[in-house]
Image (tube, rainbow, N blue to C red):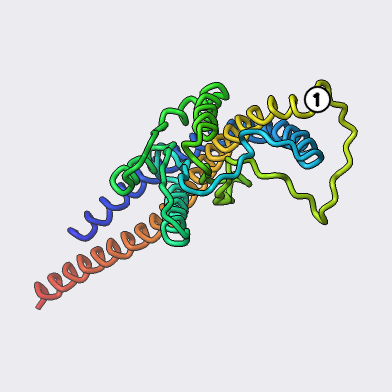
Amino acid sequence: MANLKEVRTRIASVSSTQQITSAMKMVSAAKFRRAQNAIIGMRPYANQLGEIVADIDTGDGIQTPYHEVRKLENVLLVVVTSNKGLCGAFNSNVIKQAQARIEHYRTTSDQPVHLAMITIGKRCSEFFEKRFDNIVGTYDDLLDNATFEAVATLADDIMAQFCDKKYDRVELIYNQFKNSLVQILSTEQFLPVEPVKHEGGEQKASDYIYEPSKEEILREMIPLTLRSQFYRVILDSLASEHGARMNAMQKATDNASELLKELRLSYNKARQAAITNEIIEIVSGSEALKG
């Protein structure tokens, strides 16, 4: 009977866990739909803005302070994870990629490269605060209030530091959203702005009419494009996070269902064995009395 009690306790525990994971899956599904709509709505605007900038950039070779390629001495890594766990390998993949980039700059560069890091998300902040000695900014609260204004403020600060030559390159490390099941681990160069290369070296024809001059427009649009790019990265990461958590909670719920089936089968077998033993004891006692 002790075995039966133990199995009953495990069944109750797993059943309770299943209810929690099922509820978390539904919460993540609701958040995922909002995040998915936000990133899907953002992409056409960002893509069209990028096409206009690329047309000016590749057509005339106009340069801005954001295009300046300098000797690589100071690199800023912006690492984006989530504030919470229970989302599979979402956070660990980004952290591993950030570690790989750190190792890359420390081992493959001809001369020492000074590395700095900005963390967005408690998971990477907690991980790197004990393992990396130059975290220049932590913006975990940005994920709780991911408005364009809040994100643009951080992007402007990073752009200003690049123009002041504090950093020679800025890289973004995050999960790019594809769908609820697939997140693409990405390392994206934020600054300096890279010229767009067309396939075959041919420039795509456009019918844009520019007023005022292309140079003036480009100087105004590059910061706007960079702010939009940074905002897109945050929205990508949020949508990927909720998709990963929804998928992880679905798998956890399914695993709990399978475990409950096995536990109930074990309970029924143990109960049947106990009943059989009791019957045998009763029959044996009855036969002994007859004798």
On the picture, is 4 further left or further right than 246?
A: left
Q: Residue at x 81, y 40 (%)?
A: 59
| Kind of residue indicated by mark 1 | Ser
Q: Where is residue 190 in the image (x, y as percent from the top left)?
A: 58, 41
Q: Which residue is drawn at 53% across and 48% down?
A: 71
Quarter of the view holding residue 116: top left
The quarter of the rendered structure image containing the N terminus is bottom left
The quarter of the rendered structure image containing the C terminus is bottom left
Quarter of the view holding residue 208: top right
Q: Where is residue 218 in the image (x, y as percent from the top left)?
A: 72, 29
Q: Mark 1 points at which residue?
A: 213
Foreground pick, 230 / 32:
230
Secondary structure at badge 1 equals: loop
Look at the image and tell me whether residue 255 can be seen: no
* Residue density around tag 1, few if under 14, some if 14–19, many if 20 or more, within 10 Å: few
Q: Is residue 1 above or below residue 248?
A: below
Q: Which residue is drawn at 56% across and 49% down?
A: 186
On the picture, is 281 further left or further right than 37?
A: left
Q: Residue at x 42, y 38 (%)?
A: 119
Foreground pick, 276 / 174:
174
Q: Is residue 13 above or below residue 159?
A: below
Look at the image and tell me whether residue 32 can be seen: yes
Q: Position of residue 81 (x, y in %)?
A: 45, 42
In the current view of this chain or complex, which residue is farthest to the bottom?
291
